[in-house]
C-alpha cells in the first residue's frame, strides 16, 4: 500500500509541481518507507515553495533526529 501511495503522490507532484501539499505528502510517504534522502529532498522542496509549511519542516527535523540516533556511538 505504501508503494501505491508513493506512486499516487508522485503523480500529484508531476501534475502540480508547485504544490507544497503534494510535496509534503510525498515526503511523508518516503519517510514512512525508509527513503530518508528522498524524504528530506522532497520536504526541502516543499519548504522552498512555502517556507511556512510546518509539516514539511517537521518531517525534515524528525528524519534528522532519527538518523542521528542511528549513528553508532563514538
Image: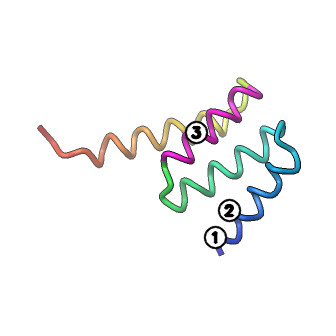
Of the numbered discs 2 and 3, the one sitting upstream in the chain is 2
Residue marked by disc 1:
3
Magenta residues span 37-50
Q: Quadrant of residue 7?
A: bottom right
Name the side, left or right, on which 21 lies relative to 46. right
Of the numbered discs 3 and 1, the one sitting upstream in the chain is 1
Tell me the quarter of the image containing the C terminus. Answer: top left
Per the model, the C-alpha gap separating discs 2 and 3 is 15 Å
Residue marked by disc 3:
41
Please say whether residue 47 is one of the residues in the magenta stretch: yes
Where 46 falls versus 5 (above or below)?
A: above
Helix, strand or loop status at disc 2: helix
Helix, strand or loop status at disc 1: helix
Helix, strand or loop status at disc 3: helix
**Residue for point 71% across, 66% down:** 5
Where 36 falls versus 41 (above or below)?
A: below
Instruction: Give the image location of residue 29, x and y in percent.
Output: 63, 57
Residue marked by disc 2:
6
Task: Evaluate if marks 1 and 2 touch, with contact meaning CB atoms under 8 Å apart.
Answer: yes
Q: Quadrant of residue 67?
A: top left
**Residue for point 58% across, 55% down:** 30
Q: Residues within 10 Å of mark 3 (few under 14, many from 20)?
A: some
Residue 54, which numbered label? none
Amino acid at each position: 500500500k505504501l508503494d501505491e501511495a508513493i506512486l499516487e503522490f508522485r503523480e500529484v507532484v508531476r501534475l502540480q509541481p508547485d504544490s507544497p501539499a503534494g510535496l509534503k505528502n510525498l515526503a511523508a510517504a518516503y519517510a514512512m518507507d525508509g527513503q530518508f534522502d528522498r524524504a528530506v529532498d522532497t520536504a526541502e522542496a516543499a519548504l522552498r515553495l512555502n517556507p511556512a509549511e510546518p509539516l514539511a519542516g517537521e518531517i525534515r527535523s524528525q528524519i534528522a533526529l532519527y538518523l542521528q540516533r542511528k549513528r553508532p556511538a563514538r
